[in-house]
Amino acid sequence: GSSCSASRDLSATAYRIRAMASKADWDELAGLASKMKATHLRTLLADQERNASMFVESEGGIVLDYCRQKVDAATMDKLFSIASKVDLDGMKQKMFKGERINETEGRPVLHVALRAPRDKEINVDGKNVVPEVWSVLDRMKAFSDKVRSGEWKGHTGKPLTDVVAIGIGGSYLGVEFAFEAFKTDPDAAAAAKGRRLRFLANVDPIDVKRALEGLSAETTLVLVVSKTFTTAETMLNARTVKDWLIKELGSPDCIAKHVAACSTALDKTSAFGIDSANVFGFWDWVGGRFSVWSAVGVLPLSLQYGSDIVRQFLDGAQMMDQHFLTASPRKNLPMLMGLLSVWNASCLGHEGCAVLPYCQALVRFVAHIQQLDMESNGKRVKMDGSEVSVGTGAIYFGEPGTNGQHSFYQLMHQGRVIPAEFIGFQISQNPVELAGEPVSNHDELMSNFFAQPDALALGKTAEELKAEGVPEKLIAHKTFPGDRPSLSLLLPKCTPSALGQLLALYEHRTAVQGFMWGINSFDQWGVELGKVLAKEVRTYLEAARKKNSPDESKFIDPTKRLLNLYLKD
């Protein structure tokens, strides 16, 4: 059940007046930025007191070291002063209290309620939503326990050992990140023995082939993840897999046993043939890119790993929520990371941000952070509709270390300046030590985690190269300018709990940037136009394939030319 109406009349209420950073504030930051641009990180890093003040540890054991950022005490003071001015603390409190801070859609922003303890109270329109959250969690636990134990059987009486989760964007990226990251955690791996989880996201029929490869319909459970049950790609994929199930199992009656849904559209799920007992809802105060904590992620992850592992993930996030809510600004990890992102993007003018996890388990982390940050903060206007006077958002990319080093670090060292965020763990999920090797495999990996930030910050001068006897003709080529900013996050171990903390840290860091810019980080109108135009193309293709004189007047000439080529027999 939804706690707030999506059809709320937004035209009736003007947007609330928010405190905004003024042009003078941004100008003052620009002045500080000029000073910082002229100060090399070698100089900044020579100040030990400054470095020590930029080493911060959270209660959950995450260490943030941001001394390699192009900031000094005066810069940080100004950033904190603007944070006070825009009432960042007040905005954060409003978010946690369930106030409608997503004003363009008239909704609260309450992903934090999805991981709140059972006895917590968070009211939306005078109604505590936490019991509703726990009611769905309890139902999902009961369902996933039944499937995992083999008590739940498919159409032909076999247990369902394989799950295909059909969803796209926010219904997929965060879940896939967690699935991949838990895979090599020893406890999670033991819990997943004999089970498989696949994802079907892209509407490309090739993705259907890949997702179903080697699966038997008799042992497959399909999860359709779509809040409205209308997402074009997801519903076409769902109908395609439904068709496969019926063909393989011989009867439409199989659907009730083989398909479950994460949705709020009970009429549509029931028309699809899904038993309403196997439909798990979420609320319109959960944005897609923040929904891994809802049925969207909890159901597939519980089926694969069991609800205890998933609970640790949620509890980790809850620990970071508490840290964000209660830690003082200068010790507050999401606050610090958010302010530094604003500084890099809006004041120093860096358009990129490299997220570099030195841990193969985080192989899909950056893909999720890409959506989380770029869909949230890729905005050009403030909440009141006026244009933001500085650049917002950044181009996020990255790969696990050390793979990235052999790919794009060349550009980071000697080409463009791209702020980087290094993520590492003290203890490996899979420690390996070979006899005769000087260090363990994990120490070999982490040697790079410690070396790269210094290489980027300090660089290598022509004088140093000369002293090493490098031939004159190679000196220019081997010089590293340095002065490339980064920060480092070091966590104890890559457990479900630590991963929950890490993802919640990035969620809150995203919100902090939006509060600073005065934008709405929780809507995504930018995805709409392409969808509308795609509908027109779809109508045209349908008519063209049926030879019903299609109307191409809506398209510009270059598009007509390409469409005609596509349709050639």
Image (spheres, rainbow, N blue to C red):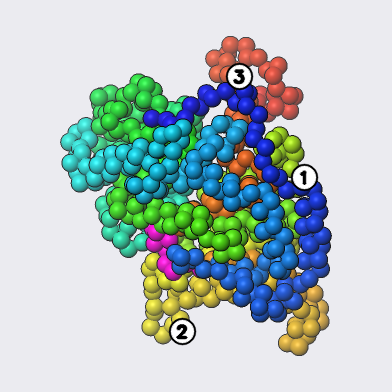
Q: Which residue is mark 1?
A: 389
Q: Which residue is mark 2?
A: 438
Task: Tell which of 248 and 167 is nearer to you.
Answer: 167
Q: Quadrant of the N terminus?
A: top left
Q: Is residue 284 above or below residue 113?
A: above
Residue type, numbered disc 3:
Tyr
Counting from the top left corner in percent of width and height, residue 161 is at 26, 45
Which residue lies at the image location 71% right of the left edge and 34% below the top edge? Answer: 385
Counting from the top left corner in percent of width and height, residue 475 is at 78, 78
Counting from the top left corner in percent of width and height, residue 322 is at 46, 56
- Whether the residues at callouts 1 and 3 have beta carbons within 8 Å, the answer is no
Name the N-terminal-most of marks 1 and 3. 1
Q: CA distance from mark 3 to mark 2?
A: 65 Å
Q: Is residue 75 above or below residue 125?
A: below
Name the N-terminal-most of marks 1 and 2. 1
Residue type, numbered disc 2:
Pro
Residue 384 is left or right of residue 471, and the answer is: left
SS class of the residue under badge 1?
Answer: loop
Which residue lies at the image location 57% right of the left edge and 37% below the top edge? Answer: 102
Q: In front of the other: label 1 or label 3?
A: 1
Which residue lies at the image location 82% right of the left edge and 60% below the top edge? Answer: 31
Residue type, numbered disc 1:
Ser
Name the N-terminal-most of marks 3 and 2. 2
Part of the protein shown in magenta:
490-499
Task: Tell which of 163 and 395 is nearer to you.
Answer: 395
Query: What crowding class fits label 3: few (fewer than 14 Cα within 10 Å), some (14-19), or many (20 or more)?
Result: some
Q: Which mark is residue 540?
A: 3
Magenta-colored stretch includes residue 4: no
SS class of the residue under badge 2?
Answer: loop
Magenta-colored stretch includes residue 495: yes
